[in-house]
Image (cartoon, rainbow, N blue to C red):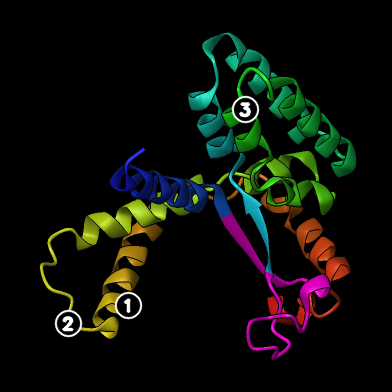
Amino acid sequence: MSLASHSSNRCCDSATNRREAADFDVPSPSTRGRGPSGNGISSPLIQRCQVHKARNIAERCPKKHVASVRRALRKAWELDDAVEAERLIRDLARRLEKEAPGVSGSILEGLDEMLTVNRLRLPPELRRSLACTNAIENMQGTIRLVTRNVKRWRDASMALRWAAAGMLEAKAGFRRLKAYRQLPALRRALAEHHPRSLDLLG
């Protein structure tokens, strides 16, 4: 593989990871005080987009396995028990290891971040809403549309103003989260994960 091709693939993988990831911006007690500066700022909880994850895996998967792989992932993600869900996903990766090692590696990549909503033991409907980044991407798409004719970005303040304008435009198309009545369960789960999260959430 050429260096240019390798660099291109790395960029694609990076973009894929960004599409899959969405942050619950709440510090984790297990990483408190271990930030780059040692200043006590901890990492957020991250949930990867399960829709994009399944799509990315399916694109790499041999055609004969696509349906069974999708079923296995869906079964794991629907489980209330995150430990059992992880076991099912690891078993799936193990079964594909010889025939499709690249797919096996893709399944395991970011596994911890794939099951965050399961580990928080959220209600199934709320889990499905929060495990998909489509709402975030819709807003980002509107921002790109609003800013498409800007030819020269003078400074960061200008970028922020245009981003804010894009968000206000996107706001007109916002819809209420289907599981919005279950959001208190998210608040409680985050509070149990880290007692200070209630203060951070306001």
Total numbered labels: 3
Q: Quadrant of residue 27?
A: bottom right
Spot occupied by residue 87 in the image (x, y as percentages of width and height): 85, 34
First-in-chain label (1 vs 2) = 2
Spot occupied by residue 134 in the image (x, y as percentages of width and height): 49, 45
Residue tagged 1: 160
- The magenta stretch spans which residues? 22-43
Q: Quadrant of residue 66?
A: top right
Q: Are marks 3 and 1 in contact (CB under 8 Å)?
A: no
Q: Secondary structure at mark 3?
A: helix
Q: Quadrant of residue 88?
A: top right
Residue at the far front in the pictured view: 2
Is there any visible trace of residue 202 in the rendered image? no
- Which image quarter holds the N terminus? top left
Q: Secondary structure at mark 2?
A: loop
Q: Are marks 3 and 2 in contact (CB under 8 Å)?
A: no
Between residue 43 and residue 190, name the one nearer to us: 43
Q: Residues within 10 Å of mark 1 (few under 14, many from 20)?
A: few
Residue tagged 3: 101
Using the image, determine if residue 18 lies above or below residue 62: below
Q: Amino acid at mark 1?
A: Leu
Q: Is residue 27 magenta?
A: yes
- For this view, does 130 lie left or right of residue 56? right
C-alpha span from label 3 to label 1:
43 Å
C-alpha span from label 1 to label 2:
11 Å
Q: Secondary structure at mark 1?
A: helix
- Which image quarter holds the C terminus? bottom right
Q: Amino acid at mark 3?
A: Pro
The numbered disc on residue 154 is 2
